[in-house]
Image: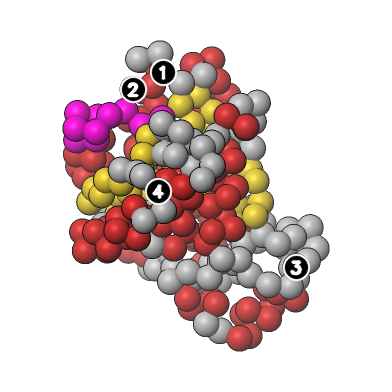
Amino acid sequence: MSSRLQGKLCLVTGGSRGIGEAIATACVREGARVIIASRKLDGLEAAKVRIAAAGPGPVHACVCHLGELDQIEELTSSVFEEIGVPDVLVNNAATNPYFGPMLDVEEAAWQKTFEVNVRGPFELTRRVARRWRDGEKPGVIVNVASILGLRAAPLQGVYGLTKAAIISMTQTLAVELAPFHIRVNAVAPGLVDTKFASALVGSPDIVKVFTDHTAQKRYAQPAEIAGAVVFLASDEAAYVTGQVLCVDGGYTVA
């Protein structure tokens, strides 16, 4: 067992499945204590058991809907008081309720996407980073963005907009928080085999379009994204901040 995150406390949102669960599992395997947050308690409890099997832990599960400000406030207050101030924050939770032309998106889907994908991560980041800054405690933030935030995202344009915002947030906060020894980076996955992306992975036509334009001619597994997050969270990346690491099998360069 490696120990790149030995003794660190990592808070991972969207940690009950997919990329978030893979990130939490990798952090535990690297010696971290982990807090996973997600909307549904049953999913969290099941994931907690799976993640705990990867290492000594411990693993904590906290219910939080990132689209609800009161739940973000409750999450941070309870974590700070009952578990501790995290050393690493991984903003992974996201939603993508609309698939289609941007001009046809309904207001409710637009609002939900921005509340969960942009406002939620920002408000959580604000609360954690202020605690680090005011307590003169170093910290690390890793935001899970997307390659769709770096280029055109046909039929997923609203989601792409939110991920472009996350990338902008990453870069700005990296500059503003560097004097306080807080690093901020992002990973930008390509197509990943998760329930979140099941509508895409489950379509042979969409998969072919993606893999035909990907250097490695395949899509990713969640653990392949987790490795990049662990690197950015670890001291191995001590001189890395404000960066967007594409984990896309060569899609953006092919």
- Does 241 sit above or below residue 48? above
Residue 164: image x %, image y %? 56, 49
Question: Does 12 lie within the magenta span?
Answer: no
Identity, as a three-letter code, of the amino acid under mark 1? Lys
Label 1: which secondary element: loop
How far is mark 4 from mark 2, CA to CA? 28 Å
Nearer the camera: disc 3 or disc 2: 3
> According to the image, label 2 marks what residue?
131
What span is in magenta? Answer: 78-88
Q: How far apart are marks 2 and 1 (CA)?
A: 8 Å
Q: Which class describes the residues within 10 Å of circle 2: few (<14), some (14-19), or many (20+)?
A: some
Give how far across and how far down residue 108 sits, in percent: 32, 63
The answer to whether 131 appears left or right of 68 in the picture is right
Q: Is mark 3 on a helix, strand or loop?
A: loop
Q: Do the residues labelled 3 and 4 touch (CB within 8 Å)?
A: no
Earlier-in-chain disc, 2 versus 1: 2
**Label 4 element class:** loop
